[in-house]
Image (cartoon, rainbow, N blue to C red):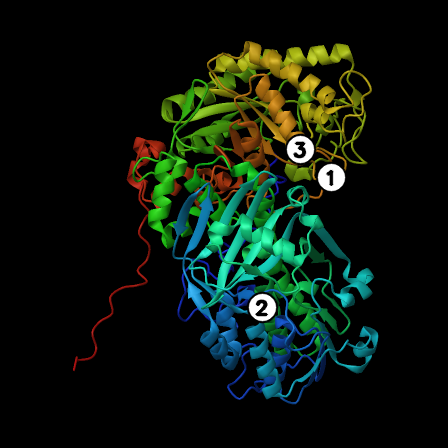
Amino acid sequence: MRVDTEGEGREDRPGAGSDGRAGAGSDGRTKAGRAGAGSGGRTNAGRAGAGSDGRTKAGRGDGGATRVAVIGGGPGGLYAAALLKRLDPAREITVWERNAPDDTFGFGVVLSDETLGGIEHADPVVYAALQAEFVRWDDIDIVHRGTRHTSGGHGFAALGRRRLLEILHERCRSLGVDLRFAAEAPPVDGLMAEYDLVVAADGVHSLTRAAYAEVFRPSVEEHRCRYIWLAADFAFDAFRFEIAETEHGVMQLHGYPFSADASTVIIEMREEVWRAAGFADLDERESVERCGKIFTDALGGRPLRANKSAWTRFRTIVNDRWSHGNLVLLGDAAHTAHFSIGSGTKLAVEDALALAACLEERPSTAEALAAYEEERRPVVASTQRAARASLEWFENLDRYLGQPTRQFAFNLLTRSRRVTHDNLRLRDPHFVSAVEREFRCPPGTPPMFTPFRLRGLTLRNRVVVSPMDMYSAVDGVPGDFHLVHLGARALGGAGLVMTEMVCVSAEGRITPGCAGIYTGRQADSWRRIVDFTHQQAPGTAIGLQLGHAGRKGSTRLMWEGIDEPLADGNWPLVAASPLPYKPDSQTPRELSRAQLTDLREQFTAAACRAARCGFDLLELHCAHGYLLSGFLSPLTNQRTDAYGGSLEKRLRFPLEVFDAVRAVWPPERPMTVRISATDWAEGGTTGDDAVVIARAFAAHGADAVDVSTGQVVADEHPDYGRSYQTPYADRIRHETGLPVIAVGAISSWDDVNSLLLAGRTDLCALARPHLYDPQWTLHAAAEQGYEGPGADWPMPYRAGSRRPQTGRTDAPRPRLTLGT
């Protein structure tokens, strides 16, 4: 891995908003006084909620918008109208809604404590009305293969969508907003000319967005499941997820109460299951009856009902821009996030809060709309990442059916990565303790400190120091820097420390500063590092990553210009095909049959040296566009011989190298393979291909697959985010049964525990956290109060095994008054 391009990206805010728990705050519990935590993570108190008289505070802007047109009378549009009118009663605000006032689609609406807090400060009247209507509950029930597991402490609040709209209608009318129902809005260009501000809140099928598509540049992605919104005339006593394994495939029920005597029920399944079950041929009534029969246990035999319900596929909408002149998108018109994290109405209401606040704070409409988008875009992007993780989990639900039912429940609860091991333990410690026992965590031992065995090697914990290129070798020889760098991380408590990619020849280096193991002097230096690790950090294993740069070689040191050719002293490059990495990169020579044989021998000679050095594990680098990766990807392998074409042929040379290395590597020591599970580029390696590649290496004796992504072609488009690469490891683990190492923006011990306990990976490799803190693993143990064999402090460091005291900030205050 090149530490600058592993792509950890921006982290999601842990616990921000809801997560299929739809109404829980960041720790899952209602927090009194938390009400000001609104959109963008900034306090809404004193922003959209101006003074109690509803007038703009002195010295603050009004956004220049005195005449406002709102297209769409859903919760977002209505709430925006109410807030803007409340902040400035002189504003003339008109809302156009194509449906009648009592028309509504769907049934229940769930809002998070965070959103409710913003509403409380922005408009206490609306908040009070909502409070009087909400039903609240704490539990989530997950029913799988006849077993129900309940997790508590989540904190939900819901009400009927119709009642929510009625409350907002009443508030708008009381403030003097002009509501026009059963009325199409006038053409947008006319509204933009007549009004100071036009708010397009016209939903997922926004005609406004379509009319200005060349400006907003929307991206609409339709997903793989069909779903239908229904209702039942009784109240579930928990948020209920129920899995049905039918002859046609897997179906799931999402249900939650929205009043004392009614619940929302969503039925969802993959498109192919929906068709196989015959739903494509059923009308609304027949679909409702069929769903009721399939989930009769969850419903207690009671019927379902519809409300203009239709089977549909969820569409994720992303826009490059949210405003154009005095026109702005809000809610589903601007963005969507899957219903399984309960975010649609929440996001729309938060948009309205932010828009009103920015118009209050900024002197012009243009500045206000720019500030609105700047504030909301990162929040929405974070929510959409979580929503995608959640919807993909349900799309691939059958992948997890074989898990123990309690682990399955934990996996479902943590699917979006917003609910984690640590905050779920705060909500429901008994449930988490039961999952940990099934995982075979010894008492008081976090999952990350449980041992793991690969062939003859037992790792004391599940933390891996990921390979990181240091560009600090001289003539391929690792020096004192490498001894200190790797030695410090070995002393830092990780179960396995990996070297950087160590090259099999001088021509196989990425840069002149890359390390090799193609000479005796280099091997002697590596032996010094291995001996230090084994003698001074006896609980830590050390592994060597073996590779060849291929077409990405002969470049400058990272800090001198990553992937840029050397100014002078370039060496010739070889690759699967004569394709330069970048337009200004050197063009490699296509490897001949004879050269392939020579290369294979270079790998085996290097592996023999590594074995004599005493490395505990060897990893073959088949990722990131280096030589062996270049054979695997169709974007970099355009050969027409036996080593190119189909995936089977593209695998041939990497497998030949693996077999040759495995033959000389000691049989009791494990071998792993690092792959790029996707190229993040059209026409490149896909997740389906990655499963085939993993299976092939497993069949040839790989003990685990280290699952990375990308860096194969320069024009890639990675989907960065917290733990963004782990779904690929998850898939390979469950579809092949092969142990996996997950990498990619795993930055906290809570993430590690969550991924392991959910069964998504066996080991977690972290790079940047170990650059920031060489003792990351030991500190993770200290922060969790763990003392045990999974994180044994070296004797010279043992005095530092507890967090140092800091300056006193909470000292006892002197008593200055007498009691009465």
Q: Which of pointers 1 and 2 indicates the residue nearer the eye?
A: 2
Tell me if residue 386 comes above or below residue 768 in the rendering: below
Quarter holding residue 729: top right
Image quarter where the C terminus lies is bottom left
On screen, residue 23 versus residue 785, left or right, reads right
The local secondary structure at tag 3 comes to helix
Q: Give x and y (percent) for residue 43.
A: 51, 70
Label annotation for residue 681 = 1
Q: Give x and y (percent) for residue 528.
A: 46, 19
- The type of residue carrying mark 1 is Ala
Residue 338, visible in the rendered structure: no
Label 1: few (<14), some (14–19) or many (≥20) C-alpha neighbours in 10 Å: some
- The type of residue carrying mark 3 is Asp
Distance (Cα) linking label 1 and label 2:
34 Å
* Residue, disc 3: 688
| Mark earlier in primary sequence (2, 3) | 2
| Mark earlier in primary sequence (1, 3) | 1
| The one of 554 and 201 positioned closer to us in this rendering | 201
Label 2: few (<14), some (14–19) or many (≥20) C-alpha neighbours in 10 Å: many
The reply to whether callout 1 and callout 2 are in contact (CB within 8 Å) is no
* Residue, disc 2: 350
